[in-house]
Image (cartoon, grey):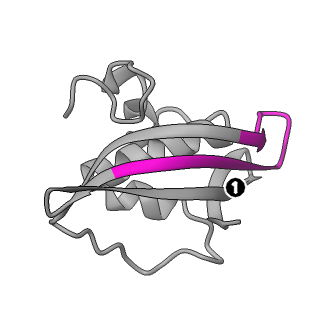
Amino acid sequence: MPKTCPCGLGEPYESCCGPLHHGTKPAPTAEALMRSRFTAFALGNEPYLLQTWHPTTRPKRIDFDPDQHWTHLVVHDRTDGTPFHTTGTVEFTAHYRYQGEPQELHENSRFVRENNRWLYVEPV
């Protein structure tokens, strides 16, 4: 496992996204879930990604491309998504390298909180 968490907060993985990935702590906010999902993509953690994907939009599996390496995340904005909300959005840019070339994915993602768990729904 990486020493510094890929999510961009600069914290050690084991005290940042690690507890979310191990199921010992739920994501308290939509942004925390977004960051933990980026880290799961960076680490190839398919079970966590599927578990945190809303069942209405969840794929059957995730096809990780071995030529794609997620490098860092920048969160630009968020709307709602706190422990006091049931919905929220997070706008971000996920940077990666594809076949050695720098690329980026810019998205505004929609999240819902059901049964006290944040779930990724879809891009807005």
Q: Position of residue 56 (x, y in %)?
A: 65, 77
Q: Which residue lies furthest to the bottom in this view?
A: 60
Residue at image point 83% right, 48% down: 86
Where 81 falls versus 108 (above or below)? above
Magenta stretch: residue 79 in it? yes
Magenta stretch: residue 57 in it? no
Q: Where is residue 16 in the image (x, y as percent from the top left)?
A: 42, 25
Q: What element carries label 1?
A: strand
Residue at image point 15% right, 66% down: 66
- Label 1 neighbourhood size at 10 Å, few (<14), some (14-19), many (20+)? many
Amino acid under disc 1: Phe
Residue nearest the observer in this picture, 98 or 2 = 98
Where 4 falls versus 117 (above or below)? above
Residue nearest the observer in this picture, 20 or 109 = 109
Q: Where is residue 34 in the image (x, y as percent from the top left)?
A: 55, 46
How many numbered circles are shown? Answer: 1
Q: In terms of image quadrants, where is residue 14?
A: top left
User: Which segment did they paint magenta?
Assistant: 78-95
Q: Position of residue 31 (x, y in %)?
A: 62, 39
The residue to which callout 1 is attached is 111
Q: Which quadrant is home to the N terminus?
A: top left
Residue at image point 28% right, 24% down: 4
- Prevalent SS, magenta region: strand
Q: Which quadrant is home to the C terminus?
A: bottom right
